[in-house]
Image (spheres, helix red, strand yellow):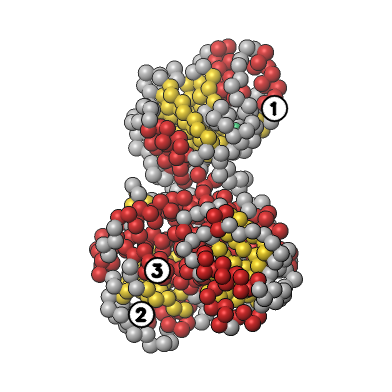
Amino acid sequence: MYEYKLMCGIVGAVAQRNITEILIKGLQALEYRGYDSAGLAVVDSEGKMTCLRRTGKVQSLADAAKTQPLLGNTGIAHTRWATHGKPSELNAHPHLSTHIAVVHNGIIENYESLRNLLIHRGYNFTSETDTEVIAHLIDWQQRQQGGSLLEVMQPVVAQLSGTYGVVVMDSRDPARLVAARSGSPLVIGCGEGENFIASDELALLKVARRFIYLAEGDLVEMTHSSLSIFDGQGNAVQRAETAPQAQYHAGDKGLYRHYMQKEIHEQPLALQQTLTDRINNGKIDFSELGSDIADRLTNVQHIQIVACGTSYHAGLVARYWFESLAGIPCDVEISSEFRYRQPVVRANSLLITLSQSGETADTLAALRLSKTLGYLASLAICNVAGSSLVRESDMALMTKAGIEIGVASTKAFTTQLAVLLMLVAFMGKKKGRPEAVEHKIVHALQTLPVKITEILTWDNSIANLANNFYDKKHALFIGRGELYPIAMEGALKLKEISYIHAEAYAAGELKHGPLALIDENMPVIVIAPKNSLLEKLKSNIEEIRARGGELSIFTDKAAAFNESKGIKTIQLPQVDDIIAPIFYTVALQLLSYHVALIKKTDVDQPRNLAKSVTVE
Ligand code: GLU
């Protein structure tokens, strides 16, 4: 069974070095899942256990960890998504009972009767969680029967009903972790002379390369040098070792109605995967390019981007970024035009091609043509390793979005933007931009998976907004600056899957023609976060209102729009300007998706379209 519930996380470690930082980094890799509090417990070789918990972000846990010594070679950590008891420090995990510490994902359904039983036996509960019963049950069982943690865990899990991925530590036996799984995934990561466990291998990619997925009902005991796994009947078993697995179960929609919906919701994970390993100590790490080639990038004086469709829109956003953040002149062109236009090549120009499949016929032809024109080098940004575009380019940066099945591109687009933004930081540094620019970009990128998780919770309000559109024949999308290409992408998505004719305009262009179209049958969708162009955009909005236009404004609190007749607003969380194009894209994807749902179109395979455009 696949786990689609993107919440809560577990990380555990047994090593011969201090593991506090590994635990915190692991939790950070799981932040995209959404959670309300975080905590960890570590134990040193003398059996001294320290536990720290905080509500809110993992960063507040990390900050608190800096102010007190947290030493231990063994530890467990957790991000909680509250099911039983409010989000609070007392309810955050780990939960303790004398020498025992427990982290748990899932729900113990019979916790009430167990709680009453344990209170009767004299236990004091310090939290409102279902999880705390596990800690006290283990303690009780140990007092009754003695024996190792593994031995007492067998009768304890037999008393639990519900779902659990649980990892347990005993401070009197500090070089060991025991874990059990039922209905909530756990994966072991094997390092060199150390072992780890987590709810998702993403948490362990920095410390382990070999993984063992536990099966339902498994119980495992691990030290830094040994692993013993037992099935639900208590028999010792071997489970297969795997290399890092594909994170996406591409052939299965799971609980989602459409692949497109699934792929929209996979974006926090897709972005996290695309960023992981490429950001180190606050800097972009593109060592995957190889040092020779990366050195050639120092000579780049101009960038030419070529792409089609949605990828073309990613290129248009990148043009704003390359010029404003890296100071590198950049042009963007549709592949089918570029290939027949006899373009004049600037000195030291880098050709960047963008394609989800890497087989887009026009883009491939443009790449092949470019080789005869004297570009400095070619770089493909692509989602399919081994595709023609990747093989035929001098270098490639992969988007790690996983297979995209919905014809209308979603996660491939946002991960393209993330790679482009990393490239902007990387190239900017090569061109002598101050380090602060790279830091600013890296910082903004690191907030992205969590921010996208947040915007997905706006699904219902956006679904309500969709009711205003489904019966319209046309729609206009407007934006300014790097949000103008996002308006174009929003319009394309609406056309593709709901068959409503939609156009995008740079807001300043309205009075040069399209204002003539405005009436109550022409809904106008505006992307208007608080930024340096907001005042200009507000004037454009007034122009539309004065002509009876109906506006739907995607905005944030600081932009201070009020709903009134003819104006609907979706007020989203505030994000850094740098990542606003990626953030607002997701809102527009949800809008098109919900309009298409109401119109009952074929969301995943819209009429007349194909996923990989391998013909000219
Ligand atoms: N049911 C547990 C709680 O409310 C665990 C929730 C989770 O999976 O994070 O604390």
Q: Amino acid at mark 3?
A: Ala
Please name the residue that numbered disc 1 is placed on. Answer: 110
Q: Which mark is residue 380?
A: 3
Between the C-alphas of marks 2 and 3, the distance is: 13 Å
Residue 80 at x, y percent in the picture = 56, 36
Q: Quadrant of the N terminus?
A: top right
- Please name whichever residue, 562 or 133, is drawn nearer the observer in this view of the structure: 562
Question: How dense is the environment of label 3, judged by Cα within 10 Å: few (below 14), some, or many (20 and up)?
Answer: many
Does residue 518 show up?
yes
Instruction: Give the mark nearer the N terminus: 3 vs 1.
Output: 1
* Residue at 37% from the left image edge and 69% from the top image edge: 323
Between the C-alphas of marks 3 and 1, the distance is: 54 Å
Residue 456 at x, y percent in the picture = 60, 53
Does residue 354 show up?
no
Displayed-image quarter of ligand 1 = top right
* Residue at 52% from the left image edge and 69% from the top image edge: 536
Q: Amino acid at mark 1?
A: Asn
The answer to whether the residue labelled 2 contacts the one labelled 3, judged by CB atoms less than 8 Å apart, is no
Instruction: Give the mark nearer the N terminus: 2 vs 3.
Output: 2
Instruction: Give the mark nearer the N terminus: 1 vs 2.
Output: 1
Q: Which mark is residue 370?
A: 2
Residue 245 at x, y percent in the picture = 48, 49
